[in-house]
Amino acid sequence: MKLTATLLLCALGMAAQTNANLSSKSPLISSSQFIYGIAKNDVLKSADKIPDNLWSFRPTPEVRTVGELFAHIADGQYEFCSAADGTKMDKGVEKNAKTKADIVAAVKAAFAYCDGVYAKMTDATATDMMSFFGMKATKIGLMDFNTAHTMEHYGNLVTYMRLKGIVPPSSEGQK
């Protein structure tokens, strides 16, 4: 566990420096976007790894199915990133998309939306204060909250995959 944490921190530091050198964005925005990219890639790779016949799987009756988790992640992208963008957007993916193809398309579109919010964020706007859930947060803070939410549900997906004998993307290549 310590080795994994150390490697992640080293990768984050190197990527933040590299991203900062390649863009006009601050290391704060680049670091946030880098960690978001890890979450995005893990979720998208999970969608590819989980076969169609497991999208209705739920470990217990009280929790979301695999498909519902992916749809919820898509809705979260719109909720948090649109708040950071100064708008309110609800696509209702979890309520409306039912097939794997529809849900995966919605997840990809949701991540693309957040990519666009990052693309137009500047050092000057990243620290603008926004209202969200009755609290005040910076735009970059809302984007980081989105990443935390995404990783929370990626953790659910990891458990589901492990229960079905699937190695999660973040564990590939590890022994």
Image (tube, rainbow, N blue to C red):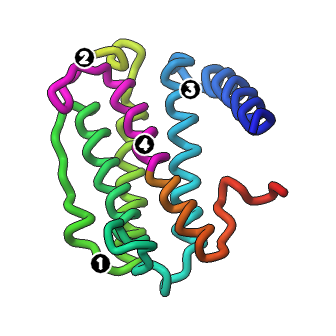
Residue 131 part of the magenta-drawn span = yes
Q: Amino acid at mark 4?
A: Asp
Residue 2 within the segment the image draws in magenta: no
**Badge nearest the viewer, 4 or 2:** 2
Q: Which mark is residue 115?
A: 4
Query: Disc 4 to disc 3, how far (Cα)?
Result: 14 Å
Which residue does the image show at 21% across and 58% down from the upper left? 91
Residue at numbered disc 2 = 129
**46 above or below 121?**
below
How far from the left and from the top, in percent, is residue 105? 39, 68
Kind of residue sitting beneath label 1: Lys
Verify CB contact (< 8 Å) between mark 1 and mark 3.
no
Q: Secondary structure at mark 3?
A: helix
Residue 98 badge: 1
Give the amino acid at mark 2.
Met
Q: Earlier in the sequence, mark 3 or mark 2?
A: 3
Q: Are marks 1 and 2 in contact (CB under 8 Å)?
A: no
User: Does 162 sit left or right of 69 as displayed?
Assistant: right
Q: Which residue is mark 3?
A: 31
Q: Residues within 10 Å of mark 1 (few under 14, many from 20)?
A: some
Residue farthest bottom in this picture? 53
Magenta residue span: 129-152
Secondary structure type for disc 2: strand
Which residue is painted at 25% across and 17% down in the image?
129
**Which of the two labelled residues, at mark 1 and mark 2, occupies the earlier sequence position?**
1
Q: Position of residue 104 (x, y in %)?
A: 42, 69
Q: Are marks 4 and 1 in contact (CB under 8 Å)?
A: no
| Frontmost residue, 77 versus 69 | 69
